[in-house]
Amino acid sequence: MPVSFLLVLVPLLCVIFANMPLGKAVKKLLFYFVLLFSLAQVYLVVCYKDLLTNGTIYSLTPVFKVSLAIDSLSLLLLLTIPIITVCALFIGWFTIKDEVQKYDFTSMLLMSLTGMNGLVMVNDIFSMYVFLEIVAISSFILIAFYTDIGSLEGAFKYIILSAVATILMLTAIAVFFTAAGDTSFVSISNAIKGSGRNTFLIAAMSIFVGGLLIKGGIAPFHGWVADAYSSAPAAVSVLLAGIITKVAGIYTLIRIVTTVFGFTPQLEMILLFFGAFSIILGALIAMVQKDMKRMLAYSSISQMGYIVLSLGTGTALGIAGAVFHLFNHAIFKAGLFANSAAVEEAAGTRDMDKLGGLSSKMPVTGFTSLVSSLSTAGIPPLSGFWSKLVIIIALWSSGHFVYAIIAVLASLLTLAYFLSMQRRVFFGKLKEEYKDIKEARFGVIFPAIMLSLITIGVGIFFFYVLDTFMLPVKSILG
Amino acid sequence: MYIDLVLLSLLTFFSIWAVMRGTLLRAAIALALVSIILSIIMFRLGSALAAVFELSVCAGFITVLFMSVISLTKPMNYVETMEMTKGRIKRFWYLPVIVLLFLAGLFFLNIPVHFKAQNIVSLANERAVLWNLRQFDLFGQVVVLLLGVFGIVILIKSRFEE
């Protein structure tokens, strides 16, 4: 059994153990389970890459005969997943008031971790589908967590659109299986290469990509994003925007396109078009939002567009840019949702027209929000600047000049709506009704501080991060 | 070939019926019929194990579960039911039309859809496939089942407490 399988097995065993009738004391340990496991995962990925990629536990081999494949892309996601999970854990633990709900949320977080870890390590398209479902089901439950009308509506929209995506993907998998004889990435890739331009396979590839665009919330398939992000509990919004959508939609898209389908001019054209469309539409809708979380949700749609646009270049630099922006966006968008949780906890509203001048009372939240906003808009030397720069260079060098200009101009739009958000929420004169508010509790602002430090750190040590984590991703092109 | 076409048409008809009906009970019966027809198609395709699962779990167990839950809910009266059914037909009448137009398009445009299955591994022993080749997927399916149970407990528990 590969060591990497432990990343899937241990969180599940933790959930089962904590939910056995062993008393509340054991349930209270759930917080430390998630924290320790996440830290251990980060430590393993940073210090013991080889153990994860090649290590085997021979004594367990007769019991678990699983085949997993970890490359530089999987490693990057395996690093991002626990970081965002810890942020969601802190926010959930400190904002959910009911004790039982707190334990339930943490258990679901572990289940979601199981699904995401499995998803980034599989090398078989059907296994990918199974783990995609685990991530999706845990997301439905987490969005509907408070069972009020808003969260149920958000969860319902997500379920319906996710079901459409699932049907498309499962149909495509059936066609791939028929063509290849099995469902491993290698077999399907060989079948596609050897099929010429078979209509059925092209149709299957198209609907599979369509399904992934729905899961990734790319415009015009973004109908569920704003409702799901804004109606979910604060911690769930961090998890959804920070990592779930990226793993379930965007990582899967990058993996399938680079490892299985291969780039064709038609596929590149589709990705470039939907990427650019998502950037523009998301930014324009974000500009007119009053609700802070809805604005961040539309901003996410726009930023996901950058990742898809970069992937659409079909070049090694484009893929590195896409992956770099995926990592950066996970960090700064989770930070912004953490800020939104802090504002909502302190002021009791997310309506930006009702807020104002909060920076004087909530200096840490104001500062971390500014860092994440500027990074999203691509202001140097923050991390978002470097990933957008790599994307624009990749677009320009591959001859997609119009798309490169769109990417630059959309950054100005991003800057405009984020400065508007900062002005309406944090700057200006403090409103009378907020004169007594205080900075959010440590448990809520800690994730924002941690994520801001990563955003600044990645920006300053850009060359190290690019060389160590991002450029090796080019190897997935083979 | 003709039997397959009839079965697929019936499958589509009962699926639409399940969605369009205003009464939960009739929708559940239509869904059970969908599962039974699907089981027959699976038998005809030579996938006996999947067919047995579909028949016992979906057509059997889940239908019983649906019926039990429906028996605990307050039914709508006749007028409300008719209004709901009419409303749905009014809103979604074009969906079957789109499907028919799509099929007609495929037929008349003569799109080359010839597709030959290649290298299908013999699935003579489904148990061997499940336990030896798809062990990681089975693990995933167990997690999905656990998630389902856990989700129901989390989301319904608070309602019961209220």
Image (spheres, rainbow, N blue to C red):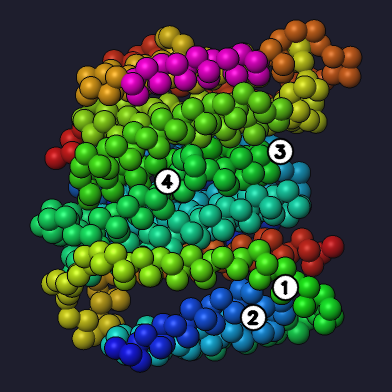
Q: B84 left or right of B125?
A: right
Do callouts 1 and 3 mark residues in contact (Cβ within 8 Å)? no
Q: Is circle 4 on the same chain as circle 3?
A: yes
Indicate the secondary structure of the residue bearing disc 3: helix
Reading the image, the residue beneath label 3 is A95
User: Looking at the image, which residue is at 53% across and 87% down?
Assistant: B33
Q: Name, please, the residue furthest toward the front.
A: B108
Q: Amino acid at mark 4?
A: Leu
Q: Which label is found at residue B55?
A: none
User: Looking at the image, which residue is at 29% across and 82% down?
Assistant: B127
Q: Is circle 4 on the same chain as circle 2?
A: no
Quarter assignment of residue B125: bottom left
Mark 4 or 1, closer to the camera: 1
Badge 1 crowding class, 10 Å Cα cut-off, few under 14, some 14 to 19, many 20 or more, is some
| Image x and y of residue A214, in percent | 46, 48
Chain of the residue where label 3 is placed in the rendered structure:
A
Indicate the secondary structure of the residue bearing disc 1: helix
Q: Is residue A412 magenta?
A: yes
Q: Amino acid at mark 1?
A: Lys
Q: Which label is found at residue A213?
A: 4
Q: Name, please, the residue furthest toward the right.
A: A432
In three-dimensional space, the C-alpha distance between marks 1 and 3, rounded to whole angstroms, equals 45 Å
Reading the image, the residue beneath label 1 is B86
Q: Is circle 1 on the same chain as circle 3?
A: no
Indicate the secondary structure of the residue bearing disc 4: helix
Reading the image, the residue beneath label 2 is B27
Closer to the chain start, of discs 4 and 3, is 3
Q: Amino acid at mark 3?
A: Thr
